[in-house]
Each structure stands twice: as structure tokens, then as C-alpha cells.
Image (spheres, grey):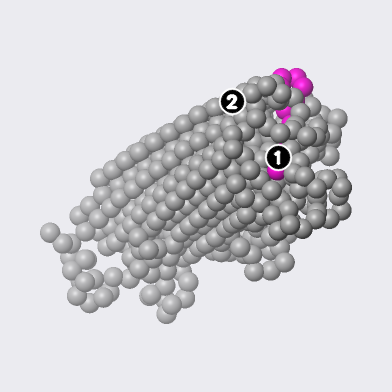
Amino acid sequence: MLSQAFIICFLTALCVGYVVNNGTSCYLYPESTTHFGQPVDDSPSIIQAFELCGTNGSVIFTNNTFNVGQAMNTTNLLNCNVSLQGELLFSTNVPYWLSHSYNVGLQNQSTAWLFGGMNVTFNGSGGSINGQGQTWYTQNKDNSNEPGRPITITFFNSTNLVVDRLTIIQPQFWATFITRSMNVILTNVYVNATSDDQYGTVNTDGSDIWNSHDILYENWVVQNGDDCIAAKGNTTNLHVKNVTCYEGNGMTIGSVGQYPNSPDYVENVLFEDVRLVDSTDGAYIKTWQGVTQDSTGNGDAGGGGSGYVRNVTFRNFELANVGLPIQITQCIYSESESDTCDTSKMQVSDITWQNFTGTSRYNIAASLFCTSIHGCPNIFFKDVNVTSVNASLGLPLSGTALQQEVYQCANIVNQNTTSGIPCNRLAPDDFGQTVTMNIS
């Protein structure tokens, strides 16, 4: 039977500013409607709804705007269905978030919303999450990782989680993060992290995965200023399919090998049917150097970690004006300390780039550097056909005598036998992930 509160709400439209509990379903309405439209923090009501209906129930965000002013932990859900029909609007109280967001255990990262459980569905249902990230883009001024700057939503300790039709606008930091989870599906997701002023949107990854396995991403569109989708340490059995990325850094393995006491293992990964437009990078693998440094370009200490990256395939990529389409770097964030670049303890092997077509921004299609300590075995190119934008238009390349596409390589074990890579230049060990001019 309908609860008395629900009947009153339905008949009088007084269902405002609280949770309406109808048996196993909880309907959320915003506090602002009882405060003359002024923003009021809805976090307590949201948390209450999950406490009431997070087990064998449903939580429905009605078609309204909900103001989120506090960090939220809605984990340990069980057999729960979530419907986001309205908008979640995160506050821009930078001092609060820097000191109250939840640490996620990786690097110096934290999150505004911890979400997860077993047998859970999260359906966007026409709603959206707005991180109001412009405040963060402006105050961060294109710097790297800032401790306390929150990931919008982190899917934590989840099994059999399905996220569908989710829209995230201007995430504060990474839009989504999957950690310590298994059997997770994220489909039909749209992320837009664009800036309204002179500052960019560094660290607005569409999604990152860490310590998780059996993950599917399908039908994503991401416009941002960093990795589109990135597989970090201890990610296995990952499938990414049918994704379009505008700007940003493309599809990524890494970074891995940051911590000496925490080995990273990444294997059985497939990125396929990907379109990259105006991206800085395309499909690349980034590992840390083998010597720990206290300060790096990533904004924190790192290097010296061990492990491997193996059995990774990037296939069916369509490129349009991509800065560096293909890369292996084993000295990420520490290129300025080139004396340590050939020291990585991470083994990279069994990697395939297949069916790549389109244009590079400059005259370089690939930079593949593996350490001399242990070269990279079983690295393959199959039907990789990339040409510079200028060459595709029949125009000469400026500032260089190298008018052909550059494929630079170092320490590829099967380079001259079975690789299929048309290597024509030695890859420097300190070659960065951002190319700003033609190779000369």
C-alpha cells in the first residue's frame, strides 16, 4: 500500500525537501523547493534515501535539481536500482572539498561520491551530474594532481554493477573511477569537461580503472583535457568498445609502476572501435621509471615500481588530427631527468595495434621506447596506416626535412622480424607524451 506521506505528496504536491518512502522505493525531492528556490544541501536526504532503500529497493531522483554540498558514501548497496531523472549539482566550495572528499587509495586522489554494492543498476534516465568543474579548472591553473580535488563519482567495491545513460558535465577532476570491483558494465555515457576561460581541463579523465577486473565500457562519448579511458594498475579483462573522444589524451594503459611496494599488473585488455578527434595522444602505454623521484610532472612522487603490461590490443581506431597516435613510454612524468629514463622495472609485452587509419597532427605516427633492461617482446603493427594532416592534403611539412611519417623505436625485441613496424628512427628514452611540432 502507498504510504501516507506518499498519498499526501501525490494529492497536494507537497513532496518537497525530503525522501518519500513508498515501500521499497524512495523518491527524492529537493530542499530548494521549500526555500524559495535557494540552493540547500540535499546530501542528507540523498544519503537517507540510500539507507532506507539501498537493500532490495529503488532510489529515484525525481526530475529536479539536487544540490550536493557534502561528500557522500552510498556503498554496500544490495539489489538496488537507481534512477537519476534530475540533475545533481555539486557545490563549488573548494576549501570544503579539499579537506572532506574521500581518499580512494591511489596516488593522492579523492572523490566526492563513493558509490557501490552488489547487483546494482544506475540508470541516468535523462538526468545528469554537474560537477561545476569550472571553479576547479580556474583555481588549478593547468597544474597537475591537486590533493583533495575530487573525482565526481567512484564506483567502489562493486560486483555486478550496471551503469547506463549517465551524463557528466564539467567534472571536478576525473569524471568516473572504478576501484576494487568486478563485473562492471558502463554503457551509453557522455562526459563533457570543457573550460569557459583561458585555463584547460587537465586531469579530467573520462574514466580510470584500478584494482578491478571484468569491466566493459561501451558507447561512450568524451570531450575532455586528459585521458579518455585509462587502465591503471591491476586491471585485467577490460573491454572498451565504440568510444568517441574529442581532444584529451586518447586510450591509455597507465600510468603504472609508480610505487616500489605495490606491483602493477595489467593484462587482457581490448580497446576497439574508437574514434579520436583532435586528441593529444591516441593509443599508448605509460610506465614510470625505475628510480623513485620525490617530485615529478605528475604532482607527486613516483617511480621504482615493478610488474607487467601484457596481452593488450588496440584495434579499429579512426584518427583525426591526433598529436601522437601510438606510444610506449617508460619514463612518464620524469622526462626532464633523462639519466633515469632507461631504468623502468615494468615489462611490456604482447601488444598489438591493428587497423589504424587517419591523420596525425605532425609527421610522427609512433614513438615506441622500451628500456634496454628488458626490451619489449611481441610488439605488433597490423594494418597501421597513419599520415600527417599536411601530407593528406598534399602539402609540405613545415620546419623539417623529414617529409615521411616517423616511426621511432627502441628495444623492440622483434623489431626486425615479425613486428610489422616500419621503424625509421631511434626513439629517445625521454620522449614525452605531448608533441608540439614536426620531428626534424
Can residue 339 be seen from the camera position used here?
yes
Give how far across and how far down residue 309 sits, in percent: 60, 28
In front: 417, or 440?
A: 417
Q: Which residues are the magenta region? A: 365-375
Relative to residue 24, is residue 357 drawn left or right?
right
In front: 291, or 280?
A: 280
Residue at 31% across / 59% down in the picture?
60
Residue type, numbered disc 1:
Ala
Residue at 75% across / 19% down in the picture?
373
Give how far across and how far down residue 33 sits, in percent: 38, 75
Residue 390 falls in image quadrant: bottom right
Residue type, numbered disc 2:
Asp
Residue at 79% across / 27% down in the picture?
342
Q: Regarding mark 2 in the picture, which secondary structure is present there?
A: strand
Residue 202 falls in image quadrant: bottom right
Is residue 27 a member of the stretch shown in magenta?
no
Can residue 291 be seen from the camera position used here?
no
The numbered disc on residue 350 is 2
Which quadrant of the rendered structure holds the N terminus?
bottom left
Please rate how many residues cluster around mark 1, counting C-alpha atoms within 10 Å: few if below 14, some from 14 to 19, many from 20: many
Give how far across and how far down residue 99 sits, in percent: 61, 51
Dot 1 corresponds to which residue?
366
